[in-house]
Image (cartoon, rainbow, N blue to C red):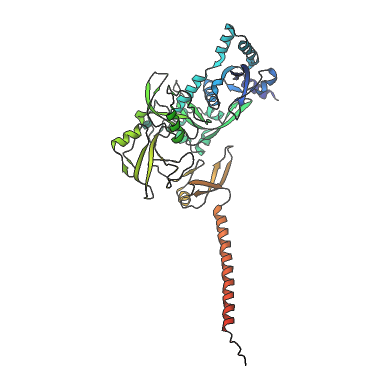
Amino acid sequence: MDDINIEELLLRKELSDILLVLDKRKMKIQAVTGIGENGEPQTVDPTKKNQNQFMRVDKSGDMFSNFFSNFLSQLRNPTNFSFFKVSGADAVTIADKMQKQVDNPSMEGEKLMKKHEVKTEKYRQDHKTLNTTDMEETSQQIKSGEYRYGPEQIDWETMSNLGLSKERLEKLNVLEPLLKGYKTNELIPISLNFGKVISKMDARLSLQPDDKGQLVVAIHGIRKEPQLNFPFFGHEFTKEDKENLLTSGNMGRVVDLKNFKTGEIMPSVISIDRLTNELIALKSEYIKIPDEIKGVKLDEQQKQTLKEGKPLYIEGMISKKGEPFDATLQFNADKRYVEFLFDRNNSDQKVNNNQQHEKVNAPQEIPKVFRGKELTDEQYNQFKEGQSVYLTGLVDRKGTEYEGFITLNKEKGTTDFSFQDPDKFAKQVKQEDSKMSSKVAKVEKEKKQEIKQVQSKPRSRKM
């Protein structure tokens, strides 16, 4: 190892902390190394021998806040644990003192625990604040074609730490939505580098100003399930609330949420981000309901029903194909628009277990973007007609480019991908079938001619 690498390693250790955990069931202090598939923290004894396995976390507030919020969201039962952030150089010594406090409590030991304890409730609340899609901002401020932020406001160094760059975001077609104030409409592969530990995950990203007005990257990681057993901005979810959220993704009513920073009471609707399982809230005053949906004009009572977050069944709507259909509508806080909720049992609208959701007045019923790649008009027309379309410039999670063919599966309503041209195979089969048919026809023709010749021969008479 050369001098530069040694300096980098020392600097990395100097700028990082260690995460200790107290399992309240075992009453034992351990050093965190990661999260297991069962939703439990992975740990080792906090000894010098195990130091290389310790999870190192960034000391800076923004990076640690994002990391710990996502770390906490992946735990199955976070209330079973208490976490402590300590200096890497003193981790072993402090862990030993903490274990002594657990075994034999004292005033001095209690002060030490409180000094280093990470307040999980604060990070749960901070993460919820990010997930409310910035409720202090109105949805009408983000108008089509207008940008809320400029590229120069983005902390590109932080983006680089996530394995992202301006060019990468542009290639994924997510930079523009970010600058307009939206979350990315798809999951983005990112990596968090904490020295010895590198965490890779898929997440939606958004840009949000902090208390100082500086733009920070909000990471919306995937949760195992929505956190419905904890208060959400002061709201306790009822059994019916939970059933509605897990069934349709929308809670179905307006509730009063509390901004704990300002004390403001905010009547809001709540939905689940179906990509990440995060809870999203939007002030009811920002809900905009169109006057007409798919050819049906809404009366004031119907508009009020939708504005209250309730589902509304509408009959006689006209699809883009000119066919009449009926469906249930509901406002979605995450998407910020009225969506269609097609019932699974409706024979005209077969959907999967998670239900398919269509945006009111959506420009396309069939997706025009595949894995971040937008189809040209010519490609899109071929795609709609069921032809296979060749795409280049697709990027996998490791950043490697690849190409292949996509085909619209009209029966399932999905997009099929293949590295081989499915049309070519179909043509070959068709050609083989055609050749076989020609051979069969030729044989049958020859047989008919033979029979005709036999029948035309004069029969010999017996004397």
Rendering coords of residue 138 (x, y %): 37, 29
Q: Residue furthest top?
A: 107
Is residue 315 among the parts visible in the rendering? yes
**Quarter of the picture holding the N terminus:** top right
Taking 32 as reference, is 387 left or right?
left
Q: Residue furthest bottom?
A: 463
Is residue 144 among the parts visible in the rendering? no
* Rendering quarter of residue 190: top right
Taking 153 as reference, is 200 left or right?
right
Please report the residue visible at 49 percent of the width from the left and 40 percent of the height from the top.
353
> Compared to 212, does 110 lie above or below?
above
Report the label total: 0
Q: Residue furthest left?
A: 300
Please report the residue visible at 57 percent of the width from the left and 62 percent of the height from the top.
433
**Quarter of the picture holding the C terminus:** bottom right
> Compared to 420, does 269 lie above or below?
above
Please report the residue visible at 41 percent of the width from the left and 21 percent of the height from the top.
259
Rendering coords of residue 159 (x, y %): 53, 29
Q: Residue furthest front?
A: 463
**Relative depth, front residue between 213 and 249:** 249
Please report the residue visible at 36 percent of the width from the left and 40 percent of the height from the top.
313
**Relative depth, front residue between 14 and 71:** 71
> Compared to 60, does 250 lie above or below?
below
Rendering coords of residue 157 (x, y %): 54, 27
> Compared to 323, does 396 lie above or below?
above
Rendering coords of residue 437 (x, y %): 56, 66
